[in-house]
Amino acid sequence: MTRLAFILVTAIILFLAFALGWAAHWLVQRFTRVSQADLNELEGMAQALHEAEEIRDQAIAYLDAREAELTRELSQTRAELSAAMDGLREARHEAEMLRRQLEDRGR
């Protein structure tokens, strides 16, 4: 094989490798290209996700506020119950003292 033939064969092989690489690149780009419809669908999904996250955040804020309100009401109710139980205990004690006084007078 002469020097000129070697150069030509090498050039042809390199050109074929380049052409094959370019064709492969073109095919990959052709099949992986995102269409405008897909982009619009993705945009719609992103908007829906954003709205859902906002609604979730509002729901969490509402639940936190409601939980705080119910906790306050529960604490207030417990305090009222404790005061009522103390008052009832004192009233029972006073009633028992009055019964004893009446029994003592009756004797």
Image: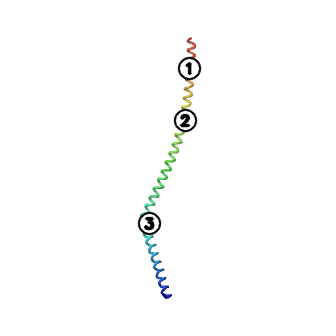
**Vertical position of residue 20 compared to residue 99: above or below:** below
Task: Compute the Cα span from label 2 to label 3.
Answer: 61 Å
> Which residue has dot 2 on it?
76
Q: Secondary structure at mark 3?
A: loop
- State the SS at label 2: helix
Residue type, label 2: Gln
Q: Residues within 10 Å of mark 3 (few under 14, many from 20)?
A: few
Please give the name of the residue rendered at 45% of the width and 58% of the height, measured from the top-left corner: 45
- For marks 1 and 2 on the same chain, the one whose residue lies earlier in the sequence: 2
Q: Please state which of residues 74 and 7 is positioned toward the viewer in this rendering.
A: 7
In this view, 54 is above or below 80: below
Earlier residue among tags 1 and 3: 3
User: Mark 1 = which residue?
Assistant: 96
Whether tag 2 and tag 3 are in contact, CB under 8 A, the answer is no
Residue in view at x 57 percent, y 13 percent = 105
**Separation of disc 1 and disc 2 at Cα?**
30 Å
- Quadrant (top left, top right, bottom left, bottom right) of the C terminus: top right
Name the amino acid, label 3: Val
For the residue pair 10 and 45, the one nearer the viewer reads as 10
Q: How many marks?
A: 3
Give x and y (percent) for residue 23.
44, 75
Q: What's under tag 1, amino acid-wise?
A: Glu
